[in-house]
Image (cartoon, helix red, strand yellow):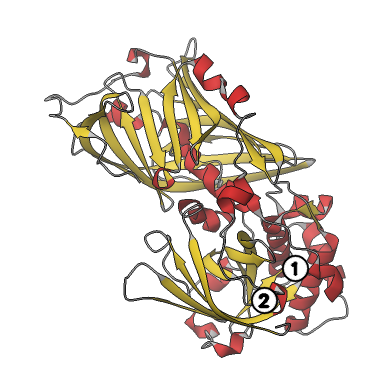
Amino acid sequence: MKHILARRNPPCAALAITAILSLLFLASCTAQHFSRLTPPADTFRIERLDDLPWRELWQGFIFNGEKVGFTRLSIEKIPGSENFRIVSEAELRILFIGMEKQISTKSDDIVGPDLTLVSFRYEENIGGGPVIIEGALKEGVFTSTRHFGDTVQTFEESVYEPLYPASVINLYPIVTGISVGSRFRYTVYDPQSQSFAGITQSVVSFEQNDDLAIEPSYKLISAMSGQEVFTWINPRGEAVFELGMGGVLLTVKETESEARRYLIETGLNKKDFVLDFSLVKTEKELPCPRETTYIEVTLDGIADDLPPIQGPGQSAEFLENGKTILYRITSDPSASPPVQAEDLPPGMRNVYLSPAVGIESDSPEIREAASLIVAGYDDVRERIKVLSRWTALNVADDAVDNPSALKVLRERRGECQAHTLLFAALARSLGIPTRLTAGLLYIEGMGFFYHSWAECRLDGWIAVDPTLGQTGIDATHIKLVEGPYPSSVLKLGNVVGKVRAEILDFESSCQ
């Protein structure tokens, strides 16, 4: 079995893609290229969407310096109703390990005159077939139905405050009233993570940029789910320019023909999302990374977005410059101080045992599969090992996005997050508290790639990589984020493309 697993080292790039897609619903930049202007004396406000001087907005989507797609927002009044339909869509084409990969999202939202959510339909396709989510908010009850393959899941939750679709994020300020110094706080339904998210927005200045042909506009900072996007909105209420991921991701207002030109331009793009952007190269190479038992490595480019996380087997500390983080990682979790069960915050044990979107641990299919897999094993630690090995051997590595443990169980294919979702669902169904983690994993001959794995709770946390079949993972796993839900890993989108790594020391059984 060790020989089989040694070949299972595919880059898990869809994890980085998923994290970056979450930024589409928002859209840091320094102000050195912008000229600040005296802001208008009056608050700019469009009282009703009927009053907007436009009904459609096209934007080119530029990622890592190359045009890779477009976004489109359209607004129409529903005949015979006071409500509006807002359609927001995006299409991207990227080079993915030498092959073209097409990504598309589309939301169709019905909103009231105050932009509050009435109903919605969202479709996403990253590969592996579309995921469709539709639902409505009525009399304080939010319902949604999720379709993927032959599976249909329905969720229901009470809502006690106004709820808005993510498509109105750049419309809310102008309907509410925008002026320099304005601040907004409200809650949106984010279909990409299938969760409610609080958003804060601040209007910080009124400025223009002649080099970028940005007319005098309000500069808006939007923060949601740990991610921040800068948007410039002109006095017509159009988002003319947006920046995210420290300037790596941007959208710019264009005509429809200019926006659609990406179909030609992407054919000329030479940068590979995985090999030229997601890959974190190191000067020193690691032989036999799966046999690495200890590593010292520094990371730069994450300190402002992802605070260092400790254990199991991992210690992390800032160096004197306050920006570089030093990680010391061992494949033996006992080398770091154990986190005792009583240290868990009240209620968190139940969170790590409960079903969640994409982790259907209450599904009869999941429960039956888990019981069959661990049949004959009573020791919890042995059950964890068996689940990890079974997932690695029975789920084929495939560059498709499978956002559901149940779908992975049925189709038996997917990338690292698919393996992790299925493992988490199986473990939770057996009463084993399990959380999701993500970070970097070293791939021999290449460097560090973004990767997802899990941790199970016994007398402390035990790291498990169900893609590689490891229980007690090798030391080349650098944990950057953790949490109970799939949305917990989205903060990775803030650092993809910015991380720099230096290996200082390592120990391996094959040195």
Residue 67 visible here: yes
- Residue 468 got which mark? 1
User: Where is 246 relative to 311, above or below?
Assistant: above
* Crowd tier of the residue under label 2, counting other residues whose Cα lies within 10 Å: few below 14, some 14–19, many 20 or above: many
**Residue extending farthest top:** 79
Q: Is residue 416 left or right of residue 398?
A: left
Residue positioned 42% across, 71% down in the render: 325
Residue positioned 40% across, 59% down in the render: 305
* Crowd tier of the residue under label 1, counting other residues whose Cα lies within 10 Å: few below 14, some 14–19, many 20 or above: many
Q: Is residue 194 left or right of residue 34?
A: right
Viewer-side residue, 17 vs 370: 17
Q: Position of residue 143 (x, y in %)?
A: 58, 40
Amino acid, disc 2 = Ile
Q: Quadrant of the N terminus?
A: bottom right
Quarter occupied by residue 192: top right
Is the Cβ of the residue at disc 2 closer than 8 Å to that at disc 1? yes
Residue positioned 39% across, 34% down in the render: 242
Q: Position of residue 400 (x, y in %)?
A: 73, 46
Q: Quadrant of the C terminus?
A: bottom right
Q: Which comes before the other along the chain, label 2 or label 1?
A: 1
Q: Which residue matches tag 2?
A: 473
Q: Secondary structure at mark 2?
A: loop
Q: Is residue 508 left or right of residue 236?
A: right
Q: How far separated are the C-alphas under marks 2 and 1?
A: 9 Å
Viewer-side residue, 419 vs 429: 419
Amino acid, disc 1 = Leu
Residue positioned 61% across, 30% down in the render: 266
Q: Position of residue 327 (x, y in %)?
A: 49, 76
Residue 370 visible here: no
Q: Secondary structure at mark 1?
A: loop
